[in-house]
Image: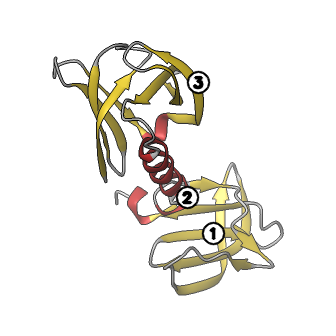
Amino acid sequence: IDKLESIEDTKGNSGDRGRLIITNLRLLWHSLSLPRVSLSVGLNCIINITTKTVNSKLKGLTEALYILTKANNTRFEFIFTNLVPGTPRLFTSVMGVYKAYTSSKMYRELKLRGAIIQNKQLRILPQEQIFSRVNGVWNLSSDQGNLGTFVITNVRLVWFANMNELFNISLPFLQISS
């Protein structure tokens, strides 16, 4: 989506000029002087993105992008500094792509007991179309059953209980293997 030159990994490789590549799934940074020195941060691992004032070896006191992540129950933090003065593109590109990624999770991730039903009607996602609605579908689990409604769209399968619409599942087709 974007490629930014002159970006410093201020925390891990301070003093080393690098390149930050922003895709729809991850951020990649690599050193320009030692290309084997690199890192990849999946957008799904990001907990928080903020800006902070940091001390860069290459730029001095400056505003930087601070990213807190979590993978395999371990937290990591990354600090990226744009070495080109007066360029907010680092912040706008990364934050814009991250916001788009998080807002599209319903299209690709299973969701249990979410606020997806309102007054027995499915909350439709942008570009989503309902193909079929089937009443009287049982969800059988744990030796008991719940009567509900099954909705098939162009994006996902949705089931919700008739007695409690918060008892539901949204299952994107991307998650179904067979």
Q: CA distance from mark 3 to mark 1?
A: 47 Å
Residue 149 in the image: above or below residue 102:
below
Residue, far front:
85
The amino acid type, in three-letter code, at marker 1 is Trp
Secondary structure under tag 2 reads: helix
Residue 151 visible somewhere in the drawing: yes
| Nearer the camera: disc 2 or disc 3 | 3
State which quadrant residue 121 falls in. bottom right
Contact? badges 2 and 3 (CB < 8 Å): no
The amino acid type, in three-letter code, at marker 2 is Ser
Q: Which residue, given by chain and number where applicable, does mark 3 sit on?
A: 53
Contact? badges 1 and 2 (CB < 8 Å): no
Question: Between residues 12 and 109, which one lies in front from this camera angle?
Answer: 12
Residue in the image at 38% along x and 22% along y: 9
The amino acid type, in three-letter code, at marker 3 is Thr
The disc, 3 or 1, on the residue closer to the chain's N-terminal end is: 3
Q: Which residue, given by chain and number where applicable, does mark 2 sit on?
A: 103
The disc, 2 or 3, on the residue closer to the chain's N-terminal end is: 3
Please indicate whether residue 21 sits to the left or right of residue 57 in the image.
Answer: left
Which dot marks residue 159? 1
Q: Position of residue 163 (x, y in %)?
A: 83, 70
Please indicate whether residue 13 sits to the left or right of residue 35 in the image.
Answer: right
Please indicate whether residue 46 sits to the left or right of residue 124 in the image.
Answer: left
- Report the quarter where the C terminus lies: bottom left
Question: Between residues 71 and 93, which one lies in front from this camera angle?
Answer: 93
- Report the quarter where the N terminus lies: bottom left
| Nearer the camera: disc 1 or disc 2 | 2
Question: Between residues 57 and 75, which one lies in front from this camera angle?
Answer: 57
Residue 48 in the image: above or below residue 72:
below
